[in-house]
């Protein structure tokens, strides 16, 4: 059997990213700053934040305009390389 292919994304498009890391007073600002380097122009209404029930973790969900695979790959790598991010979805 052949491997199923991932769905093809047509760029540019709106793209939702969820970033999970340890809660900190500046975590949301940090995530937005990194994302802005790769996808400038994020609007406040496209950012939502959730904290875990015990307050240990935060998730930041953002909608960006994705321009291509290289942009998304660089964005994911920069977030993960920071050491502050546990997961990027």
Image (cartoon, helix red, strand yellow):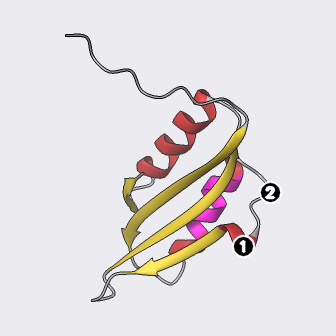
Residue on which the image places disc 1? 45
Quadrant hosting residue 1: top left
C-alpha gap between disc 1 and disc 2? 12 Å
Circle 1 SS class: helix
Give residue 42's position: percent from left, percent from top.
74, 60
Residue on which the image places disc 2? 41
Q: Which residues are magenta?
A: 30-36
Q: Is residue 41 above or below residue 70?
A: below
Q: Among all residues in the image, which is located at the extreme bottom?
A: 54
Residue 53 counted in the magenta span: no
Q: Is residue 84 left or right of residue 8?
A: left
Q: Among all residues in the image, which is located at the extreme top?
A: 1
Q: Is residue 67 above or below residue 64?
A: above
Q: Is residue 10 above or below residue 57?
A: above
Q: Is residue 51 above or below residue 60?
A: below
Quadrant hosting residue 43: bottom right
Instruction: Answer few, some or many: residues within 10 Å of disc 1's Cα (few below 14, many 20 plus, some between 14 and 19).
Output: few
Predominant SS along the magenta part: helix
Give residue 31's position: percent from left, percent from top.
56, 63
Depth order, front residue of 79/60: 60
Depth order, front residue of 45/77: 45
Q: Among all residues in the image, which is located at the extreme right?
A: 41
Give residue 76's position: percent from left, percent from top.
49, 44
Instruction: Answer few, some or many: residues within 10 Å of disc 2's Cα (few below 14, many 20 plus, some between 14 and 19).
Output: few
Circle 2 SS class: loop
Residue located 70% across and 55% down the image: 36
Depth order, front residue of 4/25: 4
């Amino acid at each position: 059997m052949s491997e199923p292919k991932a769905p093809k994304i047509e760029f540019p498009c709106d793209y939702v990213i969820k970033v999970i890391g340890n809660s900190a007073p500046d975590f949301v600002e940090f995530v937005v700053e990194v994302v802005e380097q790769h996808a400038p122009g994020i609007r406040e209404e496209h950012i939502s934040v959730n904290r875990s029930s015990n307050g240990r973790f935060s998730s930041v969900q953002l909608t960006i305009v994705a321009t291509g695979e290289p942009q998304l790959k660089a964005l994911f790598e920069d977030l993960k390389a920071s050491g502050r991010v546990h997961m990027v979805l």
